[in-house]
């Protein structure tokens, strides 16, 4: 899990983590911190800015000084079990009480929460179906649970192209992973989508996409979905990590029902194929289909 927030420094977060979750907080290089041996694994805490990786130390220091007010601190966890997620949620509540700020606190903030759910297996259907489920409900999800305006304006969580969704819908839930990857790359190689598929695609089929082809940062191959859509609203007492996890759970729940996927594919293609004089009606239709399935 990757959590972006403001209002606290890297050192403050690391020391609070060690106090609440156990382990030892230590400074690595510059303002990068690590907390080793917590009850939920190791944590990394650093300022999330590309200048951290620049060789020019003077430029990096200047960039950090200027950007600290608007560039988030990022907490990155080891893989978590459900119990680990609940313990991390308690730590998030502590950070809130200590003054942590989320994306809604300022018009300059665009803080996100990235989930990296491990794939169930390397079988084609366990990659293809969750991607298809997300693509088909993305418009509905953004309408029902809108992200903050700042993040919507930034390029980091762009919706999937309509033509990509259409081609995936025509391929359907039983398409081969190879065909899906080739279809995906024909429409986008950007990492900046609400669901970034490049890490898992490159992990499974490096012969079809190379890490350096990713637009928006070099890709680290890994057997996970990179779900970038959720906001980090850490200062909102009604928000929780579980709220955002439930969004992904819905994607997985739809993916586990191939007949529902077939229906969503058919209905999406029927809705989007005509001229939409009064705007898209897909949000309402998608919600109705999910409600009929007991999933809305």
Image (tube, rainbow, N blue to C red):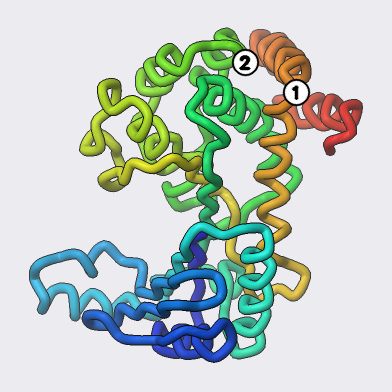
Where is residue 168? Give x, y as percent: 54, 16
- Quarter of the picture holding the C terminus: top right
SS for tag 1?
Answer: loop
- Position of 132 compared to 55: left or right? right
Bin the neighbour count of mark 2 within 10 Å (Cα to Cα): few under 14, some 14-19, many 20 and up: many
Identify whether 223 is placed above or below 2.
above
Identify whether 149 is placed above or below 248.
below
Identify whether 261 is placed above or below 220.
above
Q: Residue at x 68, y 64 (%)?
A: 83
Which dot marks residue 173? 2
> Do the residues bearing badges 1 and 2 touch, measured as CB atoms within 8 Å?
no
SS for tag 2?
Answer: loop
Q: Residue at x 37, y 29 (%)?
A: 204
Where is residue 110? Give x, y as percent: 49, 62
Q: Quadrant of residue 173?
A: top right
Q: Quadrant of residue 105?
A: bottom right
Q: Would you name the residue on which mark 1 appears?
A: 257
Bin the neighbour count of mark 1 within 10 Å (Cα to Cα): few under 14, some 14-19, many 20 and up: some
Nearest the eye: 153 or 197: 197
> Is residue 162 in view?
no
Question: How many discs appear?
Answer: 2
Where is residue 131? Give x, y as percent: 56, 29
- Position of 117 compared to 245: left or right? left
Nearest the eye: 93 or 5: 93
> Is residue 121 in view?
yes
Q: Residue at x 33, y 25 (%)?
A: 205
Task: Name the N-terminal-most of marks 1 and 2.
Answer: 2
Q: Residue at x 52, y 83 (%)?
A: 17
Which dot marks residue 99? none
- Position of 1 compared to 98: left or right? left
- Position of 228 compared to 82: left or right? left
């Amino acid at each position: 899990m990757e959590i972006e927030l403001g209002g606290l420094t890297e050192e403050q977060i690391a020391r609070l983590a060690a106090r609440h979750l156990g382990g030892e907080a230590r400074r690595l290089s510059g303002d990068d911190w690590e907390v080793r041996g917590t009850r939920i694994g190791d944590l990394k805490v650093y300022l999330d800015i590309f200048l951290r990786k620049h060789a020019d130390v003077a430029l990096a220091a200047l960039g950090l000084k200027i950007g600290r007010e608007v560039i988030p601190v990022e907490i990155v966890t080891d893989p978590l079990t459900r119990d680990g997620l609940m313990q991390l949620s308690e730590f998030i509540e502590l950070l809130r009480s200590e003054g942590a700020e989320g994306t809604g606190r300022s018009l300059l903030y665009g803080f996100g929460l990235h989930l990296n759910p491990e794939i169930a297996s390397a079988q084609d259907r366990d990659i293809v179906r969750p991607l298809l489920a997300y693509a088909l409900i993305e418009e509905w999800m953004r309408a029902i649970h809108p992200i903050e305006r700042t993040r919507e304006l930034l390029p980091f969580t762009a919706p999937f192209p309509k033509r990509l969704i259409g081609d995936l819908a025509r391929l359907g839930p039983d398409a081969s992973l190879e065909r899906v990857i080739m279809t995906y790359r024909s429409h986008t190689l950007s990492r900046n989508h609400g669901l970034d598929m490049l890490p898992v695609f490159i992990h499974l089929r490096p012969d079809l996409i190379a890490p350096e082809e990713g637009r928006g940062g070099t890709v680290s191959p890994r057997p996970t979905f990179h779900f970038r859509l959720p906001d980090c609203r850490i200062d909102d007492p009604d928000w929780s990590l579980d709220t955002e996890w439930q969004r992904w759970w819905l994607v997985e729940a739809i993916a586990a029902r191939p007949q529902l996927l077939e229906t969503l594919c058919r209905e999406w293609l029927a809705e989007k194929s005509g001229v939409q004089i009064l705007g898209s009606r897909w949000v309402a239709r998608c919600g109705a289909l999910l409600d009929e399935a007991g999933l809305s």
